Amino acid sequence: MPELPEVETVRVFLDSHMTGQKAIKINIINNKLRYEIPKNLDRSLSQTILTKIDRRGKYLILEYENNLFLLFHLGMTGYFRFSKAGKFIKHDHLSFEFNNFKIIYNDIRKFGFLKLYDKKKFASSKHLIKMGPEPLKEKFNFDYFFKNHKREVSIKNLLMNQEFVAGLGNIYCSEILFDALVNPNRLSKSLKKNEMLKIVSSTKKILKDSIKVGGTTIKNFIVSDWKIGYFKNQLNVYGRENMKCKRCKDLSSIKKITQNGRSTFFCANCQL
């Protein structure tokens, strides 16, 4: 599933093509996603200026001049592509049609979704209202972490909790904890102050580094023909089970475990 850096990469891609523009037509090709695509999408949003594209955690937010909001979640395999030919392919679901190009949403597994809100209902969306702070914003700092960390859960599962901090998933939680030298099995309440400081610092560092190179391409993350996914080359633990640790150089210290049904990777030597 795309995490914060991948969704931010998509946001920048869409912003470069769509913000300030009016779609001539919004064409529903196949409305079968996690939730059915709203039938009134074209009537509500075509010929209306898209004023802003934002991101909240793993969600994309398209804001229109008529005070309507389109909330997107990419699910496991959702992606957008830029097309001048205008040809649709298998698993296309939606197209935003402009004067000389289209932005098309494709989703093989159909776990993604989009919802249309007016301003009042958007403010109370169940998908956003309980979400924790953005990890790259000032609010996610040592003081926030210290006040909220004393829980009977592993630090990995705390970071995965979208109500604690927004946008993190398996890939970046594993990489953040490796960078911070903290074992993912550690109970959150057991962390020392210097470890909390390091986790906050590592979170911001890893996410910024990934955004710079277009995120991590794991399986299905695609954004048209953009050059993306180069952070995969910088992964230290994720997907590297029984491989050599880049820090301690042990030949087989990278381990894979399952926490809450999700894969976690870490170095058994470095992360105590």
Image (cartoon, rainbow, N blue to C red):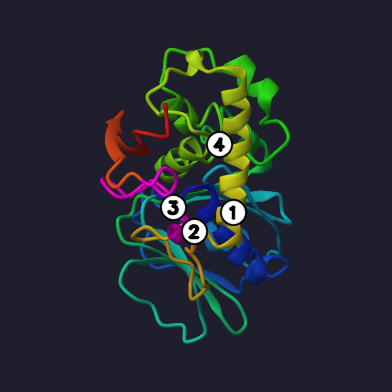
Q: Nearer the viewer, mark 4 or mark 2?
A: 2
Which mark identifies residue 231?
Answer: 2
> Residue 49: x, y in percent?
71, 64
Which mark identifies residue 166?
Answer: 4
Asked if residue 244 shows in the view, the reply is: yes
Residue at which label 1 appears: 209
Q: Quick one: SS at disc 1?
A: helix
Instruction: Give the spatial CA distance, label 1 vs label 4.
Output: 17 Å
- Magenta span: 232-249
The reply to whether callout 4 and callout 2 are in contact (CB within 8 Å) is no
For residue 239, above or below residue 132: below
Of residue 18 and residue 13, the one placed in the foreground of this image is 13
> Residue 16: x, y in percent?
66, 69
Residue type at tag 4: Ala
Q: Quick one: SS at disc 3?
A: loop
The reply to whether callout 2 and callout 3 are in contact (CB within 8 Å) is yes
Circle nearer the N terminus (3, 1): 1
Instruction: Give the spatial CA distance, label 2 vs label 3.
Output: 7 Å
The reply to whether callout 3 and callout 1 are in contact (CB within 8 Å) is no
The reply to whether callout 4 and callout 3 are in contact (CB within 8 Å) is no
Of residue 197 and residue 51, the one placed in the foreground of this image is 197
> Residue 243: x, y in percent?
29, 50
Residue type at tag 3: Leu
Residue type at tag 1: Asp
Instruction: Identify the residue at image location x=51%, y=57%.
Output: 215
Circle nearer the N terminus (4, 2): 4
Q: Is residue 256 left or right of residue 163?
A: left
Q: Nearer the viewer, mark 1 or mark 4?
A: 1
Pointer 3 local density, CA inside 10 Å: few below 14, some 14–19, many at least 20: some
